[in-house]
Amino acid sequence: MKTQVCIIGGGPSGLMLSQLLHLKGIDTVVLERQSREYVLSRIRAGVLEHGFAKLMREAECGERMDREGEIHEGFFVANNGVMKRMDLHKYSGGNSVVVYGQTELTRDLYDARDRMQGKVIHNAEDVQPHELTSKTPYVTYRSGDEIIRINCDYIIGADGFHGVSRKSIPKTVLREYEKLYPFGWLGVLSRTKPVSPELIYSRHDRGFALCSLRSQVLSRYYIQVPLTDTVEDWSDEAFWDELKRRLPEDVAARMVTGPSIEKSIAPLRSFVAEPMRYGNLFLAGDAAHIVPPTGARGLNSAASDIYYLYHAMLAHYQNGDDSGLDGYSAKALARVWKAQRFSWWMTTLLHTFPDSIEYDKKLQQTDLEYLFSSEAAQSSLAENYVGLPF
Ligand code: RFL
Ligand code: PHB
């Protein structure tokens, strides 16, 4: 097989780039290790920054998101039962975020790829990029007993944190920065009316809690749990009881509970790999960087990578201009680190750290008091939460 751009990974990053390039006449093949059903069963992001939403529209995939997604102009922060609304719209120059599930967005991208007869190959096993620093890179994968080779100009590593792309960059070239948090998030999806029309991020001595949603009949809640906990440790009843304990009393009193339809634990991690380019391989999204979900930045950082790569590829194929490709890693990393800083800050502000000393606790309370009382602090939060410009 031959293509211009071979994309490893059929998550939101890979599909979005494939779709954008296709619309400009650039040929791509997407190789995804899992089945489509499996990819669509993973419950992840719920909040999209406005820049991501704009990119979905540019990719001609925004119609359902605009119809079914909810525009949110603010959210609440609770501190031991006291709630304060963060006005995103007022403090970000009129911007907002869109509440629309990653599952739905991925489905829309798959549908668009199908409509345009895009090549998305599922169940691609043993995917391996080769000859990254030569002018003739290629990717191989296995389908049953057959090894298939795809010759291409460029390879995009959009295969998430556990993918093969980053691992194929020599250790002498790649620098990795990582911070692991001593807790995870236990998430529950339930067919219940959300407790609040806007998200509630709650700091509590018992641990962090988040009230989110997918629609007015589908709620998504999270609680901070120790890394040693498993999903089996948490019955639905235990989850709802603990969630309510960590929320302001009036919120807990109106919580509608029901059976969970999905329950999973995600560890919290910050990670950046530098550089994001090696020869003709370009990393994008979770393959290159991970944030704890507290600031809702993961998918959104992926979107800016894709935006930069898309424009760099266009300049290359349409005008023979390689400055975008050459500058990609530095440009993407500058924004990536800002998302890292914000996610680390939100995580530090709102979680209970098992090893924190009294001094840390005082500082955390002071940070929250400052946020609740300072318009400058609320502006900074709003600017970062709606998304810094790409
Ligand atoms: P993905 O989604 O991990 O997709 C990578 C794809 O590559 C495939 N793959 C391979 N394919 C071929 N060969 C291989 N060797 C392969 N190895 C892997 C995988 O099967 C997969 O399909 O990465 P991508 O596309 O970069 O997208 C990133 C986002 O998924 C991620 O950043 C967000 O989900 C993070 N995130 C959130 N981001 C937000 O912006 N807003 C949020 O509200 C938000 N909430 C969240 C989140 C992530 C969470 N979890 C579970 C980590 C909430 C949670 C709980
Ligand atoms: C979600 O709805 O899954 C969600 C929302 C906001 C976050 C993280 C996750 O910060």
Image: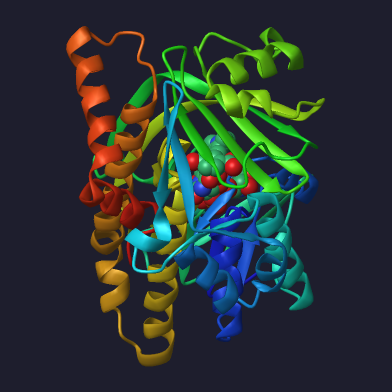
**Front one among 11 and 143:** 11
* Residue 14: % across, % down: 56, 60
**Front one among 196 and 328:** 196
* Residue at image point 46% right, 17% down: 207
**190 w.r.t. 61: above or below:** above
Q: Residue furthest bottom?
A: 319
* Residue 125: % across, % down: 68, 44
* Residue at image point 43% right, 69% down: 307
**205 w.r.t. 351: above or below:** above
| Among the 4 quarters of the image, the one containing residue 363 | top left
Q: Quadrant of the N terminus?
A: bottom right
Q: Is residue 244 left or right of residue 78?
A: right
User: Can the viewer see residue 368?
Assistant: yes
| Among the 4 quarters of the image, the one containing residue 57 | bottom right
* Residue at image point 59% right, 27% down: 250
Q: Is residue 124 left or right of residue 313?
A: right
